Image: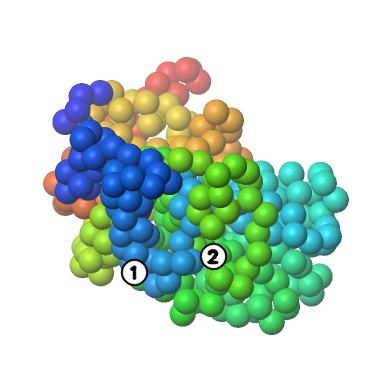
Amino acid sequence: MSDDSVYLDWNATAPLDPVVREAMLPWIGARFGNASSGHERGRQARAAIEAARERVAAAAGAHPTEVIFTSGGTEANNLFLKGVAAHGKPGWVAVGATEHPSVLEPARQLARQGWALREIGVTESGALDAAAWREALARRPAIVSVMFANNETGVVQDIAALAAGARAAGACFHSDAVQAFGRLALDFRALGLAAMTLSAHKIGGPPGAGALLLDKRMDLAPLLAGGGQERGLRSGTENVAALVGFGVAAERAVARQAAEAARLAALREVCAARLVALGATVFARDAERLPNTVYFAFDGIDGGTLVERLDRAGFACGSGSACSSARPGASHVLRAMGVAPERARGAVRVSMGCDTGAGEIAAFVAALARNVAALKSLAAVSVC
């Protein structure tokens, strides 16, 4: 695939924003310095990190002291779940059945360490099942984590209502907002969360930078012990360039969020309608979803095969979670939604961004139609 291919995998990662790159460059070159050093270079690096912290906080509706920088969303999710668990006796932990693996796997680790785990089911539309939610809260869980928007389907949960219910039950409520940040309007304090996870590379920032927004009343045990950086919760020499980039990316993504959401939602609906006209099933089409995401399948066609053919045709899209591609198979998200395994194995995800326009979507649908027809023809020949 060439560099001028049409990129439709923004939920996996966004290209680095050129403005972000320019902001980072001095800190990769001449402006080096360890932010823990007492000399001028160290003080400059510290000032750059704190400016980035203020930008991320402002973009997410948090106070700068509530921003704990991490290496990304996976570390932030692990820090919350394991950090809270280490401060108390084993009890109940409840997480959504469609969570990202970086929430599901640490929760399952806690279950092996004596915690009782409840994976909260969802409806066929991908929304958290109300009865399952009430049952989970009735167990008085100590920890609850429900993602803001799903990385595969784009389904958005009512996080404010869920957080209120969790607080009333005495639980510490966390939301993985990696996919929602920069695509939906977020306000950490207004939502009433104990913690929220963000990541830079989904919004035009660099990989390797993320944050856990943490209510100042929360106590966590660190995953990493050492020099005591990030309020003692994340030791290690800070990646100044990446954090500077994160701050600029957060500011820029939130500034354009409303306009981009409206534009992308219109493109999403055009794309979905054309896919349905070709015979595709669009998952969670009637649910509230991210404005940029369409997840679909054609019966009898393997999603991985279709993604490979589209790649050769010059279109980069996904077949589920990029973070769990080492374990291929039917999506756990679609399984939780009750989608039949044979249909789930056909899943393909299109996710759009600021470089995506109507022309790219039209070209994609045309290439998709050709490849679907070719695969159906091959299948018919093999049957004969």
Q: Position of residue 299 (x, y in %)?
A: 48, 39
Q: Secondary structure at mark 1?
A: helix
CA gap, disc 1 and disc 2 = 14 Å
Query: What's the residue type where badge 2 is placed?
Result: Leu
Q: Quadrant of the rendered structure where residue 225 is? A: top right
Q: Secondary structure at mark 2?
A: strand
Q: Is 58 situated above or below 298?
A: below
Q: Is 19 situated above or below 158?
A: above
Q: Residues within 10 Å of mark 2 (few under 14, many from 20)?
A: many
Query: Does residue 242 appear anywhere in the picture?
Result: no
Residue ID at (58%, 46%):
102
Nearer to us in this view, 363 or 231: 231
Nearer to us in this view, 209 or 266: 209
Q: From the image, tell me which residue sits under label 2.
A: 214
View extreme (left): residue: 359
Q: From the image, tell me which residue sits under label 1.
A: 58
Q: Is 288 situated above or below 189?
A: above
* Mark positioned earlier in the residue sequence (1 or 2): 1
Q: Quadrant of the rendered structure where residue 118 is? A: bottom right
The colour mode here is rainbow
Report whether 31 appears left or right of 171: left
